[in-house]
Amino acid sequence: MDIVDMIVHVDETIPAERMHELEDVVRTDACVISACTSHENSHLLLVTYNPECTTSGNVLHMVQAQGVRADLVGL
């Protein structure tokens, strides 16, 4: 299985609890292997997923659907 790592940059300052809620939302996708907030940069969400069944765009949309401004960051 191939896996892809991506970074979602949350464009606003939100509490750590809210970032953890975003992690939980992203993890609901069966194709997401992991989602966690960066320890060094608390506005970055690190996501690993299976590209055979989802896309970075889908993951980004899940985050944006929670009412936060966010963009993808290239690796």
Image (spheres, rainbow, N blue to C red):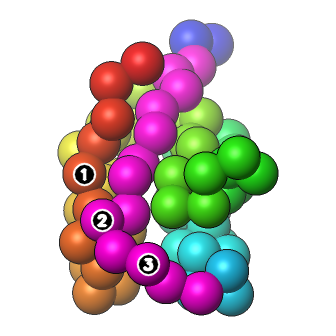
Secondary structure beneath disc 3? Answer: loop
6 relative to 3 in the view: left or right: left
Tag shown at residue 71: 1
53 relative to 3 in the view: left or right: left
Nearest to the eye among marks 1 and 3: give it. 3
**What residue range appears in magenta?**
3-15
- Disc 1 vs disc 2: Cβ atoms closer than 8 Å? yes
Q: Is residue 18 above or below residue 6?
A: below
Q: Which three-letter amino acid code belongs to the residue tagged 3?
A: Thr
Q: Quadrant of residue 15?
A: bottom right
Q: Is residue 75 above or below residue 48?
A: above
Tag shown at residue 11: 2
- Disc 2 vs disc 3: Cβ atoms closer than 8 Å? no
Q: Which three-letter amino acid code belongs to the residue tagged 1?
A: Asp
Crowdedness of circle 2 by 10 Å Cα count: few (<14), some, many (20+)? few
Give the residue drawn at x 41%, y 49%: 8
Q: Residue 24 versus residue 73: which sits nearer the camera?
A: 73
Labels 1 and 3: the sequence-earlier one: 3
Residue 40: x, y in percent?
71, 46
Residue at image mark 3? 13
Q: In the image, is residue 7 part of the stretch drawn in magenta?
A: yes
16 relative to 63 in the view: left or right: right
Cα–Cα span, label 2 and label 3: 7 Å
Q: Is residue 62 visible?
A: no
Cα–Cα span, label 1 and label 2: 7 Å
Secondary structure beneath disc 1? Answer: strand
Residue 53: x, y in percent?
41, 36
